[in-house]
Amino acid sequence: MRNLSELVERYIALAGEFGQPIPLSNFPLGDDEMARLLSAFDEDYHISRYLHFSNVSGTPYRISGEAATHLSIDASIREIL
């Protein structure tokens, strides 16, 4: 996964539908690469408003300096793909 479209495709494959939180550890990236990629998306206002991070149970990642274990994505992200 190197771009937003690939992230969304992988998310849908894992979650089955938009809006479902999935563990970040389910993505096929190393810890540092996952943190860098998602932090970059989180720091972009036009992208971050569609991404929702939560910190529940599981492996935590540092996304923009905050701990997060899960990600959900709004269906309306398709507007910017």
Image (spheres, rainbow, N blue to C red):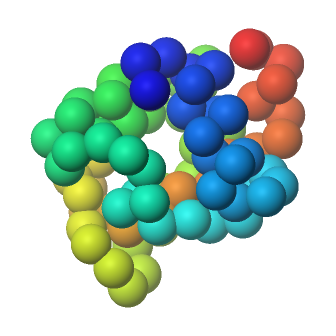
Residue at x-position 43% and y-position 50%: 27
Q: Quadrant of residue 5?
A: top right
Where is residue 62 shown, x and y percent of the image? 21, 52
Q: Is residue 46 above or below residue 31?
A: above
Q: Quadrant of residue 26?
A: bottom left
Which is nearer the eye, 27 or 35? 27
Q: How many marks?
A: 0
Q: Quadrant of residue 39?
A: top left
Q: Is residue 9 above or below residue 18?
A: above
Can residue 65 be seen by looking at this rendering?
A: no
Where is residue 68 shown, x and y percent of the image? 35, 62
Residue at x-position 21% and y-position 45%: 30
Residue sitting farthest toward the bottom = 57
Which is nearer the eye, 5 or 78? 5
Image position of 61 (left or right of 27): left
Residue at x-position 67% and y-position 34%: 9
Can residue 3 be seen by looking at this rendering?
A: yes
Specify the quadrant that holds the N terminus: top left
Q: Is residue 69 above or below residue 65?
A: below
Q: Is residue 3 above or below residue 68?
A: above
Residue at x-position 65% and y-position 34%: 8
Specify the quadrant that holds the C terminus: top right
Where is residue 78 shown, x and y percent of the image? 82, 25
Where is residue 60 shown, x and y percent of the image? 25, 67
